[in-house]
């Protein structure tokens, strides 16, 4: 147990910074174990007060502290584990400090650390305080000049902004000086030094300026940055067209590193990426990798305006930059890859991660009001639900007012650190609407449940919709208020034709009904024929919708809804019902056949996009189904879902085989949406064929695996073989490893596929893999590939009745916490759902959380999540 309870930080305690730093000159003398950092800051008292100066500083070995050129004696300043305090300072002065740090032994990967023999940094949220003494908070914006000195073995010396100067130094060393003209908070600082290859390109911006683009990667890897470069250029142009945002420096750099706690980081002018989200070629990356690279490159680039030029006043406002930037990258991806397919994928991810979070003890508002470690709030709620809120805002006020509000935001807040209120205020001004009720979406946690009942009056030609909402309690918020929920509604008739109707005297095909009270009744007029209601089109709000429509209506939607999201959703709803009925011992074979027949018809629709059909073919995931069963029984869900898959496989066999043959890639590989869609459908067909209990398709899967000309198909084959198991799978695994053992990103996939294996012996295999020579226990990608994949994507084995799956996860969390608290903390989540599972499982999960929370010397990160999860 921790000896003292860490102090919570509260939004209501926010005070402006006592001191500001206008300008800083940093000098890094880089050495793996003894890096010296000299900082010269122009400091200014902020406001009329006599407070002492208190700057953050952690794990720094102080060498000297001077004020206006005079070194301070011990008694004139104090340095403890977290702060430098100088009781007495002038109103404006120069502070000079020198510290020593040890990047090589920094395995927390926060601050300045080494990865693959290179120096790199990660400062968001609070890593800069591990580099130098600083008011490490986002509302202190400073102009940075950075001088880097290092041995010439570290060939590239990079930091934010523009290169001012570089040259040789005695003793085989060299230096570079960088200046960033844009004032920024310390979390956007970056430095990289090492041997790197570069892929170069350039782009002419909307005002005709040429921007140099450079992507730095491991020696020999430059060709694998080509797709990221292409995505970067498309992102830059898209942001000009969609939001009028032009890039502002003459140089934009990205660096890929192998050891990284997160996906990527938007440091001003010098993004740093996890190499898994940057490097790709057809042989080593799947279509999913390409898709994620495209969206993350865009995300980090878009931060240049939503995050860097306009940043957050404090970390409670994190969604101001993250939710908004996710919304922007989702809009970009929709334009690149097709709106419906993108929307379905985004909603799947939202439900899998955010809905689960909202239903458990870790539920929190999009703008939380207190935390122990801000790192724990880089969550699906802040990112994905944050993006959903922006999307609803756009639906509610319309695209023109939305764009006008964004323009205002950029104009009003450029160069400043601001709040969510200030952001929403821009849309109130632009739309002339009072959005104070809307603000509750930021402050209230939990997923609203919306119910919809409809009554058709044939004589009056009216359809009455009765809508209700209710949000279940979440930790700290027992009472919930109604939220403004935009519900997009359209009508079909029973033959599946679109049915126009009247709203406010206007003939329309679709309308936005805003449910802003606990209950509302809306009447649609001019409804000529008995309707089938298509509600919450495009998933117009992040809610759980229940309607009173009979199953037959959902078959109409599955066959014909022009809103492709709802077409997919209808199929998912039908499948979920069948699986859950089976899991509860009420298998409905007649309707299972009917469902299979409907999927067969949807598959044969020549007009439909293959990417869309691939999504239709996939049943709801096991974690998603677990959210809909109370208490959740993972074993029963797994079995029931497999049974429905087997039935689909038998029923659709001829069509699946046709797809598998017909969709073979003949021409050259293209990572674009069309090519990816065809591969997705072909691999989905194989995946489903592998569930056939009657026919052995091991040969087909093996042939698919061996003939694969790209990683997407290789993984598709391997995944099908995994389901079949036995010798063919073992052989394929061995071949795969032998072929790819020198490619870390591919070896990650090799670990991950074994972690996903739902078969009996898989847990033992996972345990054994932690002793495999390729298991790099300090590398977050490798840890996630094995541990996180197992805990999040293999419910059948993670929830082993013995509790061995939980024990494995807890052991890993405790071991990782010893050197990398951020990565350890992100693994706690799968145990957080303990209350939702069958009591005997829940008790075992809870016991592991208790074991974690009781550990001596636990980090604040893991302590916060484990204790909240125990709730
Ligand atoms: N700002 C980064 C991004 O979303 C993520 C940084 C994660 N940092 C953290 N401490 N969790 O683009
Ligand atoms: Zn971000």
Image (spheres, grey):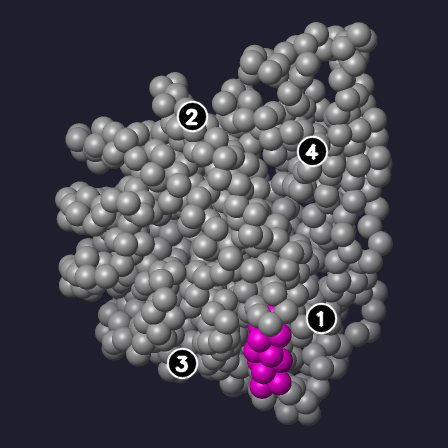
Q: Which residue is under mark 2?
A: 602
| Mark 3 Cβ inside 8 Å of ligand 1 | no
At mark 1, the secondary structure is loop
Q: Residues at badges 1 and 2 in contact (C-beta under 8 Å)?
A: no
Closer to the observer: label 2 or label 3? 2
Which residue is at the front of the view, 115 or 384?
Answer: 384
Q: Which corner quadrant holds the N terminus?
A: bottom right
Q: Residue 547 got which mark?
A: 4
- Is residue 128 visible in the rendered image? The answer is no
Image: magenta residue range: 842-855
Lower position in the chain sequence, tag 1 or tag 4: 4
User: CA–CA distance between discs 1 and 2?
Assistant: 45 Å
| Residue that badge 1 annotates | 871
Q: Is residue 593 above or below residue 729?
A: above
At x 82%, y 42%, the residue is: 482
Dot 1, crowdedness within 10 Å: few (<14), some or many (≥20)?
few
Q: Is residue 488 visible?
A: yes
For the residues carrying marks 3 and 1, which lies nearer the camera in this image?
A: 1
Image quarter of the C terminus? bottom right
């Amino acid at each position: 147990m921790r000896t003292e309870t860490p102090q919570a930080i509260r939004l209501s305690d926010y005070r402006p910074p006592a001191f500001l730093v206008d300008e800083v000159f940093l000098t890094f003398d880089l050495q793996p174990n003894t890096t010296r950092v000299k900082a010269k800051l122009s400091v200014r008292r902020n406001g009329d007060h006599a407070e002492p100066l208190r700057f953050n500083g952690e794990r720094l070995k102080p060498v000297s502290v001077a004020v206006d050129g005079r070194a301070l004696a011990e008694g004139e300043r104090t340095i403890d584990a977290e702060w430098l305090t100088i009781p007495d300072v002038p109103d404006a002065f120069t502070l000079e400090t020198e510290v020593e740090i040890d990047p090589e032994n920094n395995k927390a990967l926060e601050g300045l650390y080494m990865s693959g023999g290179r120096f790199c940094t990660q400062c968001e949220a609070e890593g800069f305080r591990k580099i130098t003494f600083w008011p490490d908070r986002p509302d202190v914006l400073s102009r940075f000049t950075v001088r880097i000195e290092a041995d010439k073995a570290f060939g590239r010396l990079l930091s934010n902004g523009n290169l001012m100067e570089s040259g040789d130094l005695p003793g085989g060393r060299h230096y570079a000086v960088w200046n960033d003209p844009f004032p920024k908070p310390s979390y956007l600082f970056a430095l990289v030094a090492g041997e790197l290859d570069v892929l170069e390109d350039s782009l002419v911006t909307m005002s005709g300026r040429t921007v140099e683009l450079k992507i730095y990667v491991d020696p020999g890897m430059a060709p694998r940055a080509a797709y990221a470069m292409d995505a970067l250029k498309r992102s830059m142009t898209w942001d000009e067209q969609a939001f009028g945002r032009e890039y502002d420096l003459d140089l934009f750099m990205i660096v890929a590193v192998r050891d990284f706690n997160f996906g990527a980081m938007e440091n001003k002018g010098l993004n740093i990426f996890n190499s898994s989200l940057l490097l790709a070629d057809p042989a080593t990356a799947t279509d999913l990798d390409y898709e994620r690279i495209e969206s993350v490159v865009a995300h980090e680039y878009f931060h240049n305006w939503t995050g860097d030029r306009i940043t957050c006043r404090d970390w409670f406002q994190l969604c101001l930059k993250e939710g908004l930037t996710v919304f922007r990258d989702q809009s970009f991806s929709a334009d690149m890859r097709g709106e419906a397919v993108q929307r379905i994928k985004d909603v799947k991810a939202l439900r899998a991660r955010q809905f689960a979070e909202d239903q458990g003890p870790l539920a929190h508002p999009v703008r939380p009001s207190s935390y122990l470690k801000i790192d724990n709030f880089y969550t699906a709620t802040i990112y994905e639900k944050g993006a959903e809120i922006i999307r609803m805002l756009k639906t509610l006020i319309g695209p023109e007012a939305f764009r006008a509000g964004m323009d205002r935001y950029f104009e009003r807040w450029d160069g400043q650190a601001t709040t969510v209120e200030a952001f929403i205020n821009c849309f109130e001004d632009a739309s002339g609407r009072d959005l104070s009720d809307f603000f509750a979406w930021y402050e209230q946690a939990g997923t609203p449940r919306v119910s919809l009942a409809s009554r058709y009056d044939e004589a009056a030609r009216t359809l009455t919709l009765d809508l209700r909402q209710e949000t279940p309690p979440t930790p700290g918020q027992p009472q919930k208020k109604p939220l403004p929920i935009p519900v997009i509604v359209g009508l079909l008739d029973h033959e599946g034709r679109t049915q126009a109707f009247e709203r406010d005297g206007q003939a329309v095909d679709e309308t936005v009904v805003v449910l802003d009270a606990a209950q509302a009744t809306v009447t649609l007029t001019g409804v000529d024929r008995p309707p089938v209601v298509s509600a919450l089109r495009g998933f117009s709000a992040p809610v759980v919708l229940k309607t009173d429509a009979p199953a037959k209506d959902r078959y109409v939607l599955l066959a014909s809804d022009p809103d492709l999201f709802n077409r997919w959703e209808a199929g998912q709803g039908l499948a979920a019902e069948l699986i859950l009925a089976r899991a509860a011992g009420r298998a409905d074979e007649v309707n299972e056949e009917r469902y299979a027949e409907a999927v067969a018809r949807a598959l044969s629709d020549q007009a439909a996009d293959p990417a869309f059909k691939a999504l239709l073919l996939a049943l709801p995931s096991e974690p998603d189904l677990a959210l809909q069963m109370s208490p959740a029984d993972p074993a029963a869900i797994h079995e029931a879902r497999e049974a429905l898959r087997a039935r689909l496989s038998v029923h659709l066999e001829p069509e699946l085989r046709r797809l598998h043959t017909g969709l073979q890639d003949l021409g050259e590989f293209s990572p674009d949406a069309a090519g990816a869609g065809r591969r997705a459908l072909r691999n989905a067909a194989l995946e489903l064929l592998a569930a056939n209990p009657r026919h052995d398709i091991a040969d087909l899967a093996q042939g698919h695996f061996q003939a694969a000309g790209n990683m997407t198909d290789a993984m598709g084959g391997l995944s099908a073989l995994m389901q079949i198991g036995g010798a063919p799978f073992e052989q394929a695994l061995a071949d795969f490893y032998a072929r790819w053992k020198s490619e870390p990103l591919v070896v990650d996939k090799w670990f991950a596929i074994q972690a996903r294996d739902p078969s009996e012996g898989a847990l033992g295999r996972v345990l054994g893999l932690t002793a495999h020579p390729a298991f790099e226990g300090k590398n977050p990608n490798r840890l996630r590939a094995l541990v996180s994949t197992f805990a999040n994507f293999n419910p059948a084995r993670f929830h082993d009745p013995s509790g061995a799956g939980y024990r494995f996860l807890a052991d890993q969390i405790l071991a990782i916490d010893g050197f990398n608290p951020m990565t350890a903390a992100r693994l706690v989540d799968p145990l957080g759902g303990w209350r939702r599972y069958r009591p005997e499982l829940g008790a075992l999960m809870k016991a592991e959380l208790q074991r974690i929370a009781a550990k001596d010397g636990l980090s604040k990160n893991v302590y916060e999540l484990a204790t909240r999860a125990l709730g």
